Image (tube, rainbow, N blue to C red):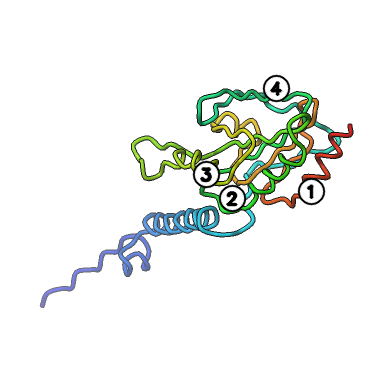
Amino acid sequence: MSKKKPERKFGNQEEVKTGLDQETRSKIYWTVLIIMIIGFFIINNLNGDGEQGPYPPHYQPTSQNERVEAFDFNLNTPDGKEVKLSDYRGKVVILDFWATWCPPCRKGIPDLVELKKEYGSEEFEVIGISLDLEVPDNPGRNTKKDVVPFIEKHAINYPVVFGNLEVTKKYGGIESIPTTIIIDKDGKISDQHVGLVPIQTYKKEIERLLAE
């Protein structure tokens, strides 16, 4: 009579039954979780009509009592002209970080156009900083080409420039758009907003800063 060979076990009993060790199950869990997070971000920023996307991880509103100098940038418009922020010293400036693929950005642009019409150029300016990208080796993700048609379609009456990584970092790590930065006549940040802002809020801030 032959003896039955003892059963060999590897790890705990659950691993024997499922055929998956703890490390493999952990990898599957984190992969699914990451896919869910990425999917939420895409839906929220590309297809949804929500007021804003996720907040930047290090975003902190600027204290109205302690204004800091705005980062002075040199950025190019779609036709190659250079826009330097310090050239607008003496004016109240709204910096609008946006992109053509962002629903709340598109919704807010008519208000910025209206503000430009109302306050003119003598003491006020809006500068649109486009975060549309030109992705190397992936033309399907290139939204930079959509900026000029968008400007023309919506009759944008203020300068629009292409942003870059340095500028987004200098302004707190822009990861949610629209983000608007309000700059006073001395070139210092007075306020900043993430998400859509009522036009009356802008008007109150502009008039307060113009009166200073």
Q: Which residue is mark 3?
A: 150
Q: Which residue is mark 1?
A: 201
Give the residue displayed 62% in from the left and 53% down from the top: 107
Look at the image and tell me in which quarter the C terminus lies.
top right
Query: Label 2: how many residues lie within 10 Å, few (<14), some (14-19) or many (20+)?
Result: some
How far apart are the alpha carbons under marks 2 and 1? 18 Å
On residue 86, the disc is 4
Instruction: Name which residue type carries label 2.
Output: Arg
- Secondary element type, mark 1: helix
Q: Earlier in the sequence, mark 3 or mark 4?
A: 4
Q: Earlier in the sequence, mark 4 or mark 2?
A: 4
Residue 182 in percent (x, y) is at: 74, 37
- Secondary element type, mark 3: helix
Contact? badges 1 and 4 (CB < 8 Å):
no
How far apart are the alpha carbons under marks 4 and 2? 27 Å
How far apart are the alpha carbons under marks 3 and 2? 9 Å
Give the residue displayed 79% in from the left and 25% down from the top: 90
- Secondary element type, mark 2: helix
Q: Earlier in the sequence, mark 3 or mark 2?
A: 2
